[in-house]
Image (cartoon, grey):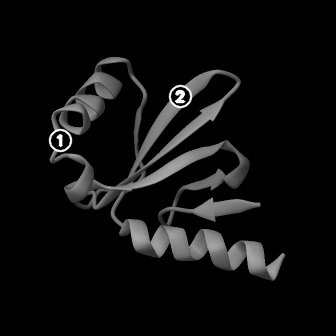
């Protein structure tokens, strides 16, 4: 199963660690430091050109990727749940 996080980006659901809201997770000190650290490590993938509303953390074969999406975390979570029901 796959999750479409933008018009041009689809990721395997089995690789997803979590779907996070950009505004809520960047309030804490740890949340604010996570995204800059991921960017310095080269782990950030820009899934859309618009302002990101959420990010999806994935791990495959030990490699972490952080996908920034212009869709809200609620939309992405609903898409993930709907795909499970339809399968």
Camera-near label (1 vs 2) is 1
Whole-percent x, y for residue 50 in the image = 26, 61
In the rendered view, does 38 fall on the left or right side of 1? left
Whole-percent x, y for residue 44 in the image = 39, 34
Between 48 and 28, the residue placed more toward the observer is: 28
Secondary structure under tag 2 reads: strand
Q: Residue at 84% across / 75% down in the picture?
A: 87
Q: Residue at 36% across / 69% down in the picture?
A: 72
> Residue at label 1?
28
Please tell me the numbered disc located at residue 68. Answer: none
- Locate residue 60: give its quadrant: top right
| 10 Å crowding of disc 2: few (<14), some (14-19), many (20+) | some
> How far apart are labels 1 and 2 at the CA level?
21 Å
| 10 Å crowding of disc 1: few (<14), some (14-19), many (20+) | few
Whole-percent x, y for residue 34 in the image = 29, 31
Secondary structure under tag 1 reads: loop
Which image quadrant: the N terminus?
Answer: bottom right
Q: Residue at 66% across / 79% down in the picture?
A: 82
Whole-percent x, y for residue 58 in the image = 56, 40
> Residue at label 2?
64
Determine whether 38 is above or below 45 in the image: above
In the rendered view, does 71 fall on the left or right side of 77? left
Please report whichever mark, 1 or 2, sits nearer to the chain's N-terminal start. 1
């Amino acid at each position: 199963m796959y999750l479409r996080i933008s018009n041009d980006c689809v990721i395997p659901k089995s690789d997803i660690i979590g779907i996070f809201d950009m505004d809520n997770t960047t309030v804490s000190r740890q949340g604010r430091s996570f995204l800059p650290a991921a960017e310095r490590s080269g782990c950030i993938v820009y899934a859309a050109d618009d302002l990101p509303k959420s990010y999806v953390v994935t791990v495959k074969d030990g490699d972490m990727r952080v996908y920034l999406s212009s869709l809200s975390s609620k939309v992405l979570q609903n898409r993930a749940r709907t795909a499970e029901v339809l399968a």
